[in-house]
Image: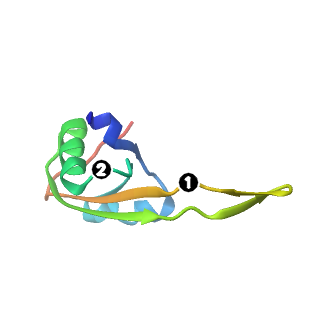
Amino acid sequence: MISHDIIKALLRTEKSTVYEPDAKYLFLVNKTANKIQIKRAVEEIYKVKVKAVNTLISCGKLKKVRYQLGRTPDLKQAVVTLKEGQKIVTS
């Protein structure tokens, strides 16, 4: 897999900004990617050193659209901890 296929987006939410002083960043990742692939992809794309990767899967919710039931997709997120002195600069 290519790095940009593994890392879909850097999530910039209110909850994810709480992590930033501790050098932790929240990413939306491919559901089939493992921690080693995520670590390599972040290091390659953002040119930083990764200390640890924690992943979590958010199950999709049932939604009602008019008369039909729908479902939001399942998401896989990764909390990436960077080594001391490292920072991801976004424009």
Residue designated by label 2: 33
How many numbered discs, if any?
2
Which comes before the other along the chain, label 1 or label 2? 2
Is there a contact, CB below 8 Å, between mark 1 and mark 2?
no
Question: Residue at image x 34%, y 37%?
Answer: 5
Question: Residue at image x 32%, y 42%?
Answer: 6
Question: Residue at image x 51%, y 65%?
Answer: 59
SS for dot 2: loop
Task: Residue 79: name its quadrant.
Answer: bottom left
Residue designated by label 1: 73
Name the foreground residue: 20 vs 25. Answer: 25
> Residue type at mark 2?
Ala
> Residue type at mark 1?
Pro
Around disc 1, counting alpha carbons within 10 Å, would you say few (fewer than 14), some (14 to 19), or many (20 or more)?
Answer: few
- Left of 38 or right of it: where is 19? right
Name the foreground residue: 17 vs 44. Answer: 44
The residue at the far front in this view is 68
> In x, y percent, where is residue 40?
18, 45
> In x, y percent, where is residue 44?
19, 37
